[in-house]
Image (cartoon, grey):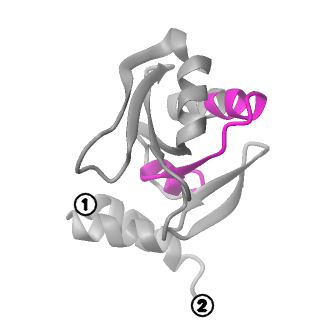
Amino acid sequence: MIAWESALDYFCIKARENAIDFYLIGSVSAAIRGVNIVPHDIDVIVDVRDFWKAKTVFNNIITESFMDGLENKPVSCFGRIHVNNIFIDISAKPKNIYGCLKIEMLCWNGYIIKAQTLELLLKVYKKNNRYEYTKAIEDYIATFTV
């Protein structure tokens, strides 16, 4: 198992054991589908209640303090943990953690994982001029197009 897979596997185990509801965004949400992208970190969104639970669960591997009340940010809380040389950014949104995002249920490594859609991720990468990631997603989508 490569580093990001091992880190995600560890996070999934702990999340399941502690009933932490989460979904993935960013490059890892493409990589778990098989898109030719190697994530350098893992981005996780949780509910605010689960954010504080995560702080307790991962207390021994926190690398950036868990903070709340972030003003002018798209999330209300943020913290970072370090697992197998991979940073996992844990952000929280109050109330409806899914907001207007379209989320898909995916099976990865025996887990059912919620992740943002490839269409949304592609839109974000295009907007941010992430050409390599955009091409990787477009190539992956093209393999399913007849």
- Three-letter amino acid code at the position of disc 2: Val
Residue 139's tag is: none
The reply, left or right, for residue 8 in relation to residue 12 is left
Q: Which tag is nearer the camera, tag 2 or tag 1?
A: 1
Q: Is residue 13 above or below residue 70?
A: above
Instruction: Check disc 1 and report its element: helix, strand or loop.
Output: loop
Residue drawn 32% across the image and 66% down it? 124
- Residue to which mark 2 is pinned: 146
Q: Residue furthest top?
A: 60
Is the residue marked by circle 2 packed among few (<14), some (14-19), or many (20+) residues within 10 Å?
few
The reply, left or right, for residue 130 in relation to residue 105 is left
Q: CA distance from mark 2 to mark 1?
A: 26 Å
Q: Position of residue 52 (x, y in %)?
A: 54, 28
In-front residue for pair 75/126: 75
- Residue to which mark 1 is pinned: 130
The reply, left or right, for residue 52 in relation to residue 87 is right
**Residue 17: in magenta span:** yes
- Three-letter amino acid code at the position of disc 1: Arg
Instruction: Check disc 2 and report its element: helix, strand or loop.
Output: loop
Q: Residue furthest bottom?
A: 146
Residue drawn 56% across the image and 59% down it? 96
Q: Could you tell me if residue 35 is visible in this image?
A: yes
Q: Is residue 23 above or below residue 8?
A: below
**Residue 80: in magenta span:** no
Q: Quarter of the image containing the C terminus?
A: bottom right
Q: Position of residue 64 (x, y in %)?
A: 35, 21
Residue drawn 27% across the image and 49% down it? 73
Q: Quarter of the image containing the N terminus?
A: top right
The residue range painted magenta reads 11-34
